[in-house]
Amino acid sequence: MRHGDKIKNLGRTASHRAALLSNLACQLIEHKRIITTLAKAKSLRVYAEPLITRSKNDSMHNRRVVFSYLQDKEAIKELFGTIGDKVAGRPGGYTRIIKLPRRMGDAADMAMIELVDFNEIYKKDAKEGAKKTRRSRRSAGTTKKVEMAAPQAPVVDETPATDVTPEAPAAEGTEENNA
């Protein structure tokens, strides 16, 4: 039975698992996106997000704590430099896991784990969506309806205008009969 065993061992000893997660975290910080197995990605999220939270406050203590986990000076510079600045306003959820097709060799579940603030594809949509909250969507929806109704009203008024209809031959015949 595995009662109370919440650590994903990944089939490794404690030292091997610590080295694996440290290397994966360094690669994630360096490349902003890595492809690995789903189990490793889920374990990496638990390992890396507290380190990213520490990078929001650039102090000597936080640098030393993070260095005790990562053991890579370049990763520390990147983490406390560009990554710390970008995630400063985010309250959490710094990584995103996207499932990929199974690996051909052994049919392992694969996933891509990436830093959320460094994805340009979702970033454009996120800028529009990030400003909107549930409350602002409602107000924005009514604003859009008013804006949409205003341009449509003149178009509807211009369409049935007499300028378009009298050009028809029946209208010209009617004018000749009236004259």
Image: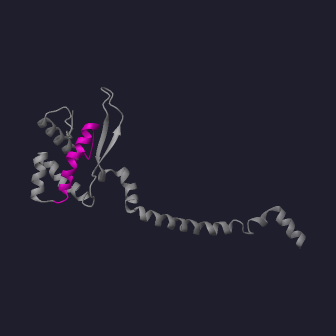
Q: Please give the range of residues in magenta.
A: 29-57
In the image, taking residue 21 as reference, residue 64 lies left or right, namely: left
Magenta stretch prevailing secondary structure: helix
For image coordinates 23% across by 41% down, the residue present is: 43
For image coordinates 20% across by 58% down, the residue present is: 56
Q: Is residue 65 visible?
A: yes
In this view, 99 is above or below 58: above
Q: Is residue 35 magenta?
A: yes
Residue that lies at the very extreme toward the top in this rendered image: 105
Q: Which of 102/29 is in front? A: 102
Q: Quadrant of the C terminus?
A: bottom right
Q: Is residue 37 visible?
A: no
For image coordinates 12% across by 56% down, the residue present is: 62
In this view, 161 is above or below 21: below
Quadrant of the image occupied by residue 123: bottom left
Residue 23 position, x and y percent, is 17, 41
Q: Quadrant of the N terminus?
A: top left
In the image, taking residue 156 as reference, residue 106 lies left or right, namely: left
For image coordinates 32% across by 30% down, the residue present is: 103
Residue 64 position, x and y percent, is 9, 53
In this view, 28 is above or below 172: above
Q: Which of 145/177 is in front? A: 145
Residue 50 position, x and y percent, is 20, 51
Quadrant of the image occupied by residue 133: bottom left
Q: Is residue 121 magenta?
A: no
